[in-house]
Image: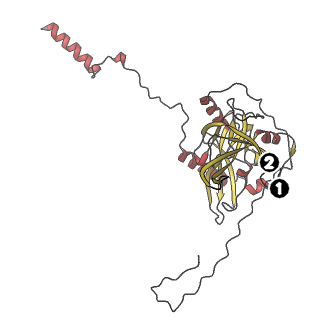
């Protein structure tokens, strides 16, 4: 009986250590990492935290209005040192990380047309081309008077750090692009490459509709020249199939090596047309138009800057006089009021 008792005690001890009765050595260690190695952005917190930091900068008097930026644009620009064109391709995963490190979200602190209250949103994209220098679309740095009366811009990094935009140092209204100064912001500069061809694979890092650091891919669809209006000379454009939408303006479009071949500018949607036989054809064709790097490259060389359009405030609505209440109408009858 004694040997059986000892065996029983031994088995009971083993079960106590491992109640499932399995071999402890065969149980793999926990696969849940202490911290997820991937970059995971929480859009709501990213934007709200950036807004709070921006309000603090405003209280400290460190923000510059768009009107001040436009008026202080230098007439001429100096040469900017650029990194050499990269020759080693990245995997898409590596490229996404590379672009994220060099891309910022453009935060906008603004006043609505007929309000003095300041609001905040993530409204556009920019990327580093040199120390403390970003490239973005010029329309990002101008005011649409139907949407706002004044604005101030900040650059928000992937870590959520916020830096004021203090100067526009180079601009091209014709090509919808500009270089902006952001003191203290030292991000890896992306190389600029000219001569992209239709069919080349491209990628884009931007913030469409506030979805921060979205990475999409496609190809060059065509190269074109187009003018903004009759006052401007045509600019060189690159149409791409990489997805983006409002909020992406100013984002870098690159090749597999991480060289910028274009900058997001606009989207043109064609939702119907008439065929040659006169029949209506339904469908949607989107042309995602980007400013070619050739136009960005010009701004890094000495030359004359094109003026930045100054904001034109919307006129305040004239007060409408309320019509006197008709005494002949019964009190229960609703009377139209001026709006």
Image quarter in which the N terminus is found = top left
Residue at image point 23% right, 13% down: 10
Which secondary structure, mark 1? loop
The one nearer the camera, 66 or 235, is: 235
The one nearer the camera, 135 or 245, is: 245
Which secondary structure, mark 2? strand
* Image location of residue 301, percent across then percent down: 85, 39
Residue at image point 61% right, 49% down: 284
Image quarter in which the C terminus is found = bottom right
Rendered image quadrant of residue 119:
bottom right
Mark identifier at residue 171: 2
Tell which circle, 2 or 1, labels the residue nearer the N-terminal end: 2
On the image, numbered disc 1 is attached to which residue? Answer: 231
Residue at image point 37% right, 20% down: 27
Q: Residues within 10 Å of mark 2 (few under 14, many from 20)?
A: many
* Image location of residue 144, percent across then percent down: 70, 58
The type of colouring in the image is secondary structure
Q: Residues within 10 Å of mark 1 (few under 14, many from 20)?
A: few
Can residue 62 be seen by looking at this rendering?
A: no
Residue at image point 61% right, 42% down: 243
* Image location of residue 283, percent across then percent down: 59, 50
Task: Establish if 319 lies above or below 286.
Answer: below
Mark identifier at residue 67: none
The one nearer the camera, 250 or 17, is: 250
Q: Residue furthest left?
A: 1
Q: Residue furthest top?
A: 3
Give the Cα separation between the discs numbered 2 and 1: 16 Å
Rendered image quadrant of residue 17:
top left
Rendered image quadrant of residue 217:
top right
């Amino acid at each position: 009986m004694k040997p059986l008792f000892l065996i029983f005690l031994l088995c009971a001890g083993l079960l106590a250590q491992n109640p499932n009765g399995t071999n402890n050595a065969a149980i793999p260690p926990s696969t849940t990492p202490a911290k997820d190695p991937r970059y995971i952005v929480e859009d709501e917190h990213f934007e709200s935290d950036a807004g709070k930091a921006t309000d603090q900068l405003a209280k400290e008097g460190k923000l510059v209005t768009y009107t001040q930026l436009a008026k202080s644009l230098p007439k001429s620009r100096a040469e900017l040192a650029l990194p050499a064109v990269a020759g080693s391709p990245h995997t898409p995963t590596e490229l996404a990380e590379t672009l994220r490190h060099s891309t910022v979200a453009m935060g906008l602190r603004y006043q609505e047309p007929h309000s003095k209250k300041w609001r905040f949103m993530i409204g556009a994209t920019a990327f580093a081309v040199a120390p403390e220098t970003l490239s973005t679309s010029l329309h990002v740095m101008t005011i649409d008077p139907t949407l706002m009366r004044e604005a101030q811009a900040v650059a928000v990094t992937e870590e959520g750090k916020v830096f004021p935009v203090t100067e526009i140092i180079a601009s091209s209204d014709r090509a919808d692009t500009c270089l902006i100064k952001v003191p203290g912001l030292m991000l890896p500069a992306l190389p600029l490459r000219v001569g992209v061809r239709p069919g080349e694979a491209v990628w884009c890092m931007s913030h469409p509709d506030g979805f921060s650091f979205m990475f999409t891919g496609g190809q060059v669809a065509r190269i074109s020249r187009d003018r903004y209006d009759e006052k401007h000379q045509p600019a060189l454009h690159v149409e791409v199939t990489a997805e983006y939408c409002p909020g992406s303006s100013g984002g870098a479009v690159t090749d597999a090596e991480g060289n910028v071949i274009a900058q997001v500018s606009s989207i043109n949607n064609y939702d119907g047309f008439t065929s040659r036989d006169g029949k209506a054809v339904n469908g949607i064709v989107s042309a995602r138009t980007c400013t070619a790097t050739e136009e960005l490259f010009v701004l890094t060389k000495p030359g004359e800057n094109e003026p930045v359009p100054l904001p034109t405030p919307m006129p305040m609505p004239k007060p409408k006089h309320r019509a006197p209440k008709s005494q002949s109408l019964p009190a229960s009858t609703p009377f139209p009021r001026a709006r």
